[in-house]
Structures are given as C-alpha cells and as structure tokens.
Amino acid sequence: MGRRNGTMSENFKNELAKELGFYDVVQREGWGGIRAKDAGNMVKRAVEIAQQQMLNRS
C-alpha cells in the first residue's frame, strides 16, 4: 500500500505546526515524528480554516 499524496501544501503544514506548537519536532524528526494527536489537531485546524474561508466567500 503506497502513500497518498497530501492535499495540504508544505508551507501550510509548516504554518499549522508553528501555530499548534510542534514545529520543532517537525524540524528535528520530520513529519513522521509528530504524535497522532498533533496530526489530528492539525487536520482539525485546517478544516476550521477552510470552513471559515467558505463562510467569508458567501
């Protein structure tokens, strides 16, 4: 089973990691080093941002 390509840009993921406080782990260990909880929080925050952008467009 191969890895799927991500839908978030690397820059956006980095900004979310900085906002959520685990960018230092990403720098040291790469994306594979973050906790599952942090990955979940990152996805949750990305969804919140997308929803807010959709509301602002209407």
Image: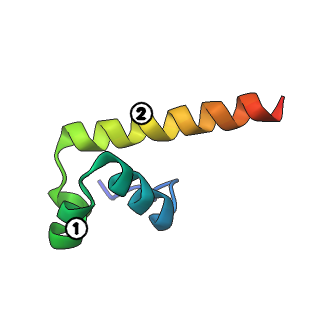
Vertical relation: 8 (above or below) 45 = below
Indicate which disc residue 44 carries: 2
Given the image, on which type of amino acid does mark 2 rest? Lys
Which quadrant of the structure image shows residue 23? bottom left
Q: Residue at x 69, y 38 (%)?
A: 53
Q: Position of residue 44 (x, y in %)?
A: 41, 33
Indicate which disc residue 22 carries: none
Q: Position of residue 35 (x, y in %)?
A: 16, 46
**Tag count:** 2
- In the picture, the quarter occupied by the C terminus is top right
| Crowd band around label 2 with a 10 angstrom C-alpha radius: few (<14), some (14–19), many (20+) | few
Instruction: Give the residue at mark 1.
Output: 30
Q: Position of residue 51 (x, y in %)?
A: 62, 30
Q: Residue at x 32, y 46 (%)?
A: 20
Vertical relation: 7 (above or below) 49 = below
Q: Residue at x 26, y 61 (%)?
A: 31
